[in-house]
Image: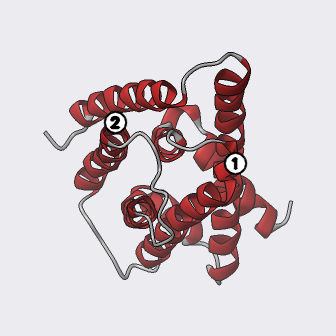
Amino acid sequence: MGQFQLYFQLGIQHILDLDGFDHILFVVALCAIYVLRDWKKIIILVTAFTVGHSLTLALATLNLVRVNTDLVEFLIPVTIAITALSNIFKPKPSTSRGIHINYLFALFFGLIHGLGFSNYLRSLLGKEASIFEPLLAFNIGLEVGQLVIVAIFMVAGGILNGILGVNRRDWALIISAIVLGMSLMMMLETKYW
């Protein structure tokens, strides 16, 4: 297996890992207020998150940024809770043509999430002569993994909304409330306290 493929698969596994489901919860929270026809907005959201995640992952891997791991592990569920709360207070996406606040949330929160995985990736990349290709492969895998989550979630939402007649607003509120509850539990379980 080549280096690119190895790190690409590691990126996908990082997102789809059920033991570290914080990314899955965050992506679900980002998508909860959207429907299938909003697919372009969703791709922009996910990509904004990946850009933020990639930036801090690269900076931390290059040892240009160092942060308290316990603080980051606490802030990750905080970002999920804020996103879920935002959905609860505004369960429909903005119809304006400008930059949506959700895009800024995704970018900024991606910065925090990228710090969460940086120590592990730094230890893996410490043996590599050049980290550009592994970082690129990892981040592309990350994006692909997120799009898999988005596709599964949006299809499930489409079936419930379109075929079974579940109200779109109710769906967004229920999903966001579940994600909020799970993120609050994750906050309480961190070592930050």
CA separation in Å, label 1 and label 2: 21 Å
Determine whether 181 is above or below 113 in the image: above
> Would residue 17 be found to the left or right of residue 102 on screen?
right
How many other residues sit within 10 Å of disc 2, few (<14), some (14-19) or many (≥20)? many
Residue sitting at the far top:
164
Could you say which quadrant of the image residue 102 lies in? Answer: bottom left
Name the residue located 47 percent from the left edge and 32 percent from the top edge: 172
Residue 37: numbered disc: 1
Q: Position of residue 139 (x, y in %)?
A: 63, 66
Three-letter amino acid code at the position of disc 2: Ile
First in residue order: circle 1 vs circle 2: 1
> Residue 12 vs residue 72: left or right?
right
Total marks drawn? 2
From the top left corner, tell me how far across and down residue 153 is, in percent.
64, 35
User: Residue 186's image quarter?
Assistant: top left
Point out the frontmost of discs 1 and 2. Answer: 1
* Residue 91: x %, y % from top left: 41, 39
What element does badge 1 sit on?
helix
Count neighbours of disc 1 (C-alpha within 10 A) and say few if under 14, some if 14 to 19, many if 20 or more.
few
106 relative to 160 in the view: left or right: left
x 36%, y 61%: residue: 112
The one nearer the camera, 65 or 111, is 111
Residue 115: which numbered mark, if any? none
- Three-letter amino acid code at the position of disc 1: Arg
Circle 2 residue: 88
Q: Quadrant of the N terminus?
A: bottom right
Q: Which of the two residues, 187 or 90, is positioned nearer the viewer here?
A: 90
Q: Is residue 68 above or below residue 175?
A: below
